[in-house]
Image (cartoon, grey):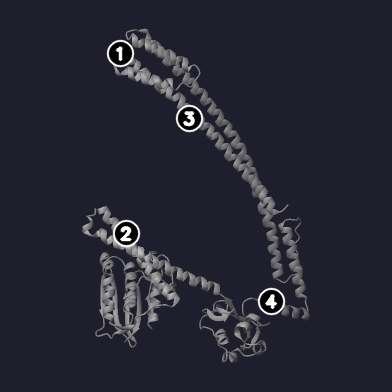
Amino acid sequence: MKIKTKLRLGLGVLFLMILALSLIAARYVYVLKEDTENILQDNYKTLDYSRSMFLAIDQIRTDPKAWARFEQNLKNQQVNVTEPGEEEVTGKMEAHYRALKKDTLHAELPVLIRNDLAELTRINMEAIRTKSDKALATAQAAFIWIALAGTVCFLIALTLLINLPGNIGNPIRELTESIRAIAAKKYAERLHFSGEDEFGELASSFNTMAEKLEEYDNSNLSRILVEKKRIEALINNMHEPVIGLDEHKRVLFANEEAVKISGIAVSDLLGKSATELAEQNDLIRALIQEKPGANGSNGQTTTPSLKIYADNKESYFEKEIVDITIVPTGERVRKFIGQVILLKNITPFKELDFAKTNFIATVSHELKTPIASIKMSLQLLESQQTGALNEEQKQLMSSIKEDSDRLLKITGELLNMSQVETGNIQLNIQQSSPYAILKYAIDAVKTPVEQKHIELVVGTDDQLADVKADMEKTAWVLINFLTNAVRYSQQESKIHIQLTGTEYGVKFLVRDEGKGIDSRYRSKIFDRYFQVPGSSKTGTGLGLAISKEFIEAQGGSIGVTSEIGMGSTFYFELARA
């Protein structure tokens, strides 16, 4: 029997027993609920009516209202007759009451009514006792059945607990030991599992693998040559371009896809120096060019995507260079023997990225209109001409205004990011005063600065030259720096702003007294959507990425210096006009 079938059978039986246990428990709980409800609905009400009538009959000669109370409880009792004999006693009590009502001075009638009430109470007490005994019997039966079903479930679970780990763990342990033997080149190792379950199939496949490894280990040169041709065929049948180079940059192999996109014949490619080919072929030059410091821990180099005309359209490829090293026999130092250049076609992903960018730009643009309508409506509501607002309405208005401002900021950042991703940054570069840029930014953050009682310490060099900049976008960057500084600063702290002249132009610095940025995250701080772990998540993670694109698009530079506990300094530098 298959292990999967055994597991399904055992767990299925256990599941059915648990289901049966649940159904039994639910049934008996329902029965007990019905018995309890019967006592409460039938007998308890009658006892309550009887008690009320007892009190009324005692006060009937002194309290005129006692007649009405007695009659009301008598009527309630007449519609709550549920036990055998209860109807006759209720009828007799009604007759005695009618007689007493006609002859209020009769001495024996109140006694007869009390006797009727006592009999009615006795009948219901007997009924309660009977129903209680029935409920007790139901509870005892429930205990027996639940205990029986629980015992069966426990035995099945115990059986699975004892047998299942051994049935699965022992073959896995044997398989692990055999794999270690194969890794030690003991290809004569075999597994001996009896049965036709999955482990039997695994043993058969493992033994087949071991036989083939033993055969490969004992193969001769002709077999090696066959395998070499097999590898070459596999490389040629790959759908991605692959080029192999030796340690002297000579082309060892190139599959058909690589030959197709390079535009060079196979005879002119194989055995030739890639450095010499790069002098006449732009693609080969781009392929063998390595970015300094880009090597990973596995000897791999990944570079930005390449745009190549392939498959009758512009296609995008991601280049990966893998260094091939070996340890020669008798030596300990690894030796570089060549490289493999892999090109992965990422055109579908680029197309999806373009579609995503267009979608974000469209949605962000469409969102601006309703947000602008909301802000216009808020301005109308704040006007005194529309009427005064109470405090709660003012709080709601303030909350809506903050949320709409936040939405407007996010949509603005998304629109800016879509411009960045599509390369459509529209700049109005002109001669701009750094003092004007600074004043515009300080005025924009005046409200949050005052709310947190933060002091802005501004220091500027005298007679700074104008810079070549888009004033609006540069001010946006400086506002973003100041907003972040306010967000991560404590109440009543200081933010330092400096404008200094440099050989290149003017440098803008914003330094806060916050907790600083860990060195692990400083290199990623300008990446899109990145936020320092543990920081406030109110933003989109795009502000600094957009700032970097805006400044670099103007020919400037941007950066950050920070230490934990010492605050952070964000800066950018622009060329003088």
- Number of residues whose C-alpha sits closer than 10 Å to that of mark 1, classed few (under 14), some (14–19) or many (20 or more): few
**Label 2: which residue?**
400
The amino acid type found where label 3 is placed reads Glu
SS of the residue under disc 2: helix
**Whether residue 245 can be seen here:** yes
- The 10 Å Cα crowd at callout 3, few under 14, some 14 to 19, many 20 or more, is few
Q: Earlier in the sequence, mark 1 or mark 2?
A: 1
16 versus 536 height, above or below: above
* Contact flag, marks 4 and 3 (Cβ < 8 Å): no
Relative to 137, say whether 14 is above or below. below
> As displayed, is residue 450 above or below residue 68?
below
* CB contact under 8 Å: marks 1 and 2: no
Residue 11, above or below 529 = above
Mark 3–mark 1 Cα distance, whole angstroms, equals 37 Å
* x, y percent for residue 363: 42, 66
Q: Secondary structure at mark 1?
A: loop
Left/right placement of residue 211 relative to residue 57 reads right
Q: Earlier in the sequence, mark 3 or mark 1?
A: 3
Q: CA distance from mark 4 to mark 1?
A: 114 Å
Marks 1/2: CA–CA distance: 71 Å
Residue 401 location, quadrant: bottom left
Residue at x 39%, y 64% (from the top left corner): 537
Circle nearer the viewer, 2 or 4: 2
Nearer to us in this view, 71 or 253: 71
Q: Which residue corresponds to mark 4?
A: 234
**Tag 1: residue type?**
Arg
Q: Residue at x 75, y 79 (%)?
A: 226
